[in-house]
Amino acid sequence: MSYDSLSDQWPSRFINRHSELESIIPESIEAVRIKESSHEVLQKWFDDIHSIIQTHNIRAENIYNMDETGFSFETIKATRVVIDKTQRS
């Protein structure tokens, strides 16, 4: 099976077909991180992660570090992201 190549217009046409989506320039979330970071919150997170690792016998080589921005194998050149504009956070 063969598919045509995607054009440069594909992302904007996709967003136009889905009214709940929009393309934005991402903003810093540092303020939210600072607000939600307390000793108790962080300790609970580490306790939960430890429990999951123990329960499922996850080996260290199968643990990866990333945040809500995801990951990339190469340098990210795009400065826009697609979001669900019906969500508040």
Image (tube, rainbow, N blue to C red):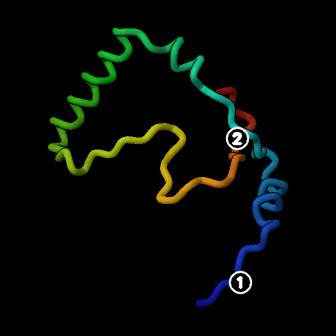
Outermost residue, bottom side: 1
Which residue: 74% across, 40% down?
A: 25
- Residue at 82% x, 61% y is 13
Q: Which residue is mark 2?
A: 84
Mark 2 Cα-neighbour bin, 10 Å: few <14, some 14–19, many ≥20? few
- Residue visible at 35% across and 9% down in the picture: 39
Task: Pick the quarter of the image with the N terminus.
Answer: bottom right
- Which is closer to the viewer, label 1 or label 2? 1
The local secondary structure at tag 2 comes to strand
In the image, 63: left or right of 83? left
Left or right placement of residue 9 versus residue 2 in this view: right
Q: CA distance from mark 1 to mark 2?
A: 27 Å
Q: Are marks 1 and 2 in contact (CB under 8 Å)?
A: no
Give the residue type at disc 2. Answer: Asp
Q: Quadrant of residue 10?
A: bottom right
Location of residue 67 in the rendering, given as x and y in whole percent from the top left corner:
46, 37
Say which residue label 1 marks. Answer: 4
Could you say where residue 51 lies in the image, as x and y percent from the top left?
21, 29
Q: Earlier in the sequence, mark 1 or mark 2?
A: 1
Relative side of 61 to 31, left or right: left
Please state the horizontal and vertical placement of residue 36, each as a whole percent of the image. 49, 14
Relative height, residue 26 to residue 18 (above, below): above
Judge by depth and name the residue closer to the eye, 2 or 80: 80
* Mark 1 secondary-structure assignment: loop
Q: Residues within 10 Å of mark 1 (few under 14, many from 20)?
A: few
The percent position of residue 74, horizontal first and vertical second, equals 51, 59
The mark tally for this picture is 2
Front residue of this view, candidates 25 and 56: 25
Describe residue 18's horizontal placement relative to residue 28 as left or right. right
Quadrant of image for the C terminus: top right
Kind of residue at badge 1: Asp
